[in-house]
Amino acid sequence: MSEGNGTRRIETPALARVEGEGAMHVRLRGEEVLGVELRIYEPPRFFEALLRGRALTEAPDITARICGICPVAYQTSACQAMEDALGIEVEGQLRTLRRLLYCGEWIQSHALHLYLLHAPDFLGFESGFAMAAEHGEVVERGLRAKKVGNRLIEAVGGRSVHPINVRVGGFHRAPERRALEELREELERCREEALATVRFTAGLEFPELERPYELVCLRPEEAADYPIDRGRIVSSAGIDVAAAEFGATFEEQQVPHSTALHARVRGRGAYLTGPLARFNLNRERLSPLAREAAEEAGIGAGCANPFRSIVVRAVEILYAFDEALRLIDAYERPKRPAVAWEPRAGVGHGVSEAPRGLLYHRYEIDDEGRIVSAWIVPPTSQNQRSIEEDLFEFVAAHAALPDDELRHRCEQTIRNYDPCISCSTHFLRLEVERG
Amino acid sequence: MSGARPKLAVWKFASCDGCQLSLLDLEDELIALAERIEIAHFLEASRATVEGPYDLSLVEGSVTTPADAERIREVRRVSRRLVTIGACATAGGIQALRNFADVEEFVATVYADPSYISTLETSTPIADHVPVDFELHGCPIDRHQLLEVVSAYLAERRPAISEYSVCIECKRRGNLCVMVAHGTPCLGPVTHAGCGALCPAHDRGCYGCFGPMESPNTESLAGWLRGLGAETPDLVRLYRNFNAGAPAFRAASEAQEERA
């Protein structure tokens, strides 16, 4: 769209194939980029406020409702923060179950994004449904992966959206080994297909864009574990801190053009969390099968192009299948489904790797087990600044593209992040209007 | 709906996206469904949108902003049938806890300054704003029930969704009663069926995520729960969560508060 003063505006008033409600605005004069904005207009839901006064046992169920796509991430970070405050450790088979549940979420969430939301950008379709007509096999493979991911969540968590079996200290009921064994055949089949998907994504065409991100993710203390359910917070620029240091390491800033707060590394700037960060900083921790697949896909030495995140997600899906099968092999039903605890006053911190990246929870609880304060930092609010910097660089390099194509490519630049806008919005600043 | 394929639209208000995700979670039926109906507006899944009117609109989420209070009227105007899906759309959702609090206090505690985003003092269900043809309960909804509702409207019939309690489902499933056997507080006797009695099957009491059944006796259940040792704040919290704004649960939590 041209304006009288020679300014060109590229706008998408309602972003599609993302979770939640957001808009994109890009302004150019000639080939000079004047500004890029990822605007979020998803209504705020006040989670940190409504958690106050609730029992600490309710935090996993309540915070799950922040996001229907990654409820396990919220439940895991919430549980671990409470367990930190209570001074208990959840290890052994209970940790196995927690990680297994999380593998299910990675599989269903990554499969949804990769096959139904992101792949259509590369193949030139408006949706996964439209893509199915010509690429039926790919879409069906995606739906099978998503389905078995959901079945895995159901087997451990009872339900795929907002699992009911998760509690502070572990689970309400530990699943029978047989219930997990029943999934083995389908998990193995989908693991084979995930390998084919890594090859499929490696063959897509990627716009050129390499950015010098500061990558931030978890690194588990167990040397063999790829980051999923827990770990220390590390970065490509040398951060290596415990979850409790999150607030001392990162800060949230208000920017004039956005209603959501942007996170940054204190004293530095934007950072990137999610698949690219996990992969680049931990790829030696992938299973041999996933590592070889990454090698074959041409990202064995690392990957700094956000458009190639689709390949990294494919590798992570493959890993999650491998890891789920390994965990099922190692599973023996524990005698008790949860670690016992007594309420005590304290502060706790919890971190885990949501499919989209680092998810931090902090709670203060009183001696009767009630929540005094809550602070939740979801991955998409951490990535907002990087998303806009990607957009700026991409538009600056491709300003000559016609409006429609540039708009589509800009949307793709945002979708590279699998942004979860529903998650990020309780950070909105707001104004009360009397109804 | 003769001739062309019926047009389906999916709309989002304040919510977590989990109920519309349930449509995409119909992995076995999704492609067949997309062939029988035209997915005309479903931003979470497709960039392409077709203009209304729509034969069936599925609405997720509650109304929490002045702009959304306007938008739902427009959605109603372009929808032949409008079905609300999930606790947010049918009862205001967990965000309706603001209805019991001082919103300004919420704001002052959490956010430093007022800004350009506006919010209403309450989170309200869609039916408070426009006529609704059918309400499908659950936080989240059950995907098989969703398929039944969509199929029913395509066939021009009423959806076959049971209105009895989780207790009935629990007995049918052969679960041990967690309240009788373990003294675990359970909302099963007053909660709308639909989940398949998941929580009791996992040795846990029902926490009411499908909202109140038709004519629930919340007062009687509260008495039994007090007998198990529950105190007023526990009872208020039990009735005041994901369906806090549903009239029967709202009345129940307020009745407990008044007793204190």
Image (spheres, grey):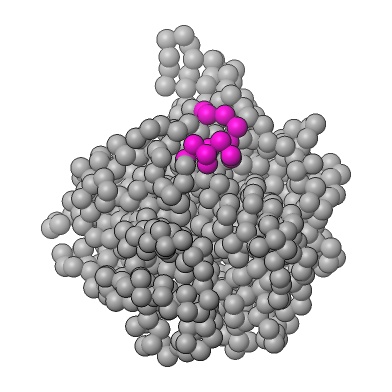
Q: Residue furthest left?
A: B2
Above-or-below relation of B110 to A57? above
In this picture, is A244 found above or below A331?
above
Q: Residue at x 23, y 69 (%)?
A: B159
* Residue at the spot 58% in from the left edge and 51% down from the top edge: A52
State which quadrant residue B164 falls in.
bottom left
> Residue B140: x, y in percent?
43, 63
Q: Is residue B257 magenta?
A: no
- Does any portion of residue B256 appear in the rendered image? yes
Total labels drawn: 0
- Depth check, front residue: A67 or A34: A67
Side (left or right) of A72 relative to B61: right
Determine the residue positioned at 42% across, 90% down.
B174
Which quadrant is the N terminus of chain B positioned in? bottom left
Residue B245: image location, x then y, percent: 37, 55
Residue furthest front in the image: B260
> Which secondary structure type mostly characterizes the magenta part of the structure?
helix
Q: Which residues are magenta?
A: B103-115
Instruction: Please state if A289 lies on the left or on the right of A115 as rendered.
Output: right
Q: Horizontal and vertical percent for residue A258?
A: 55, 30
Q: Judge whether residue A291 can be spotted in this image.
A: no
**Picture residue at 52% right of the left edge, 83% below the top:** B183
Tell which of B203 and B217 is nearer to you: B217
**Left or right: residue B211 compared with residue B97:** left
Give A85 or A384, whichever is nearer the viewer. A85
Residue B113: in magenta span: yes
**Viewer-proximal residue among A85 and B40:** A85
Query: Residue A374 in the image: x percent, y percent?
Result: 63, 50
Position above or below: A358 against A91: above
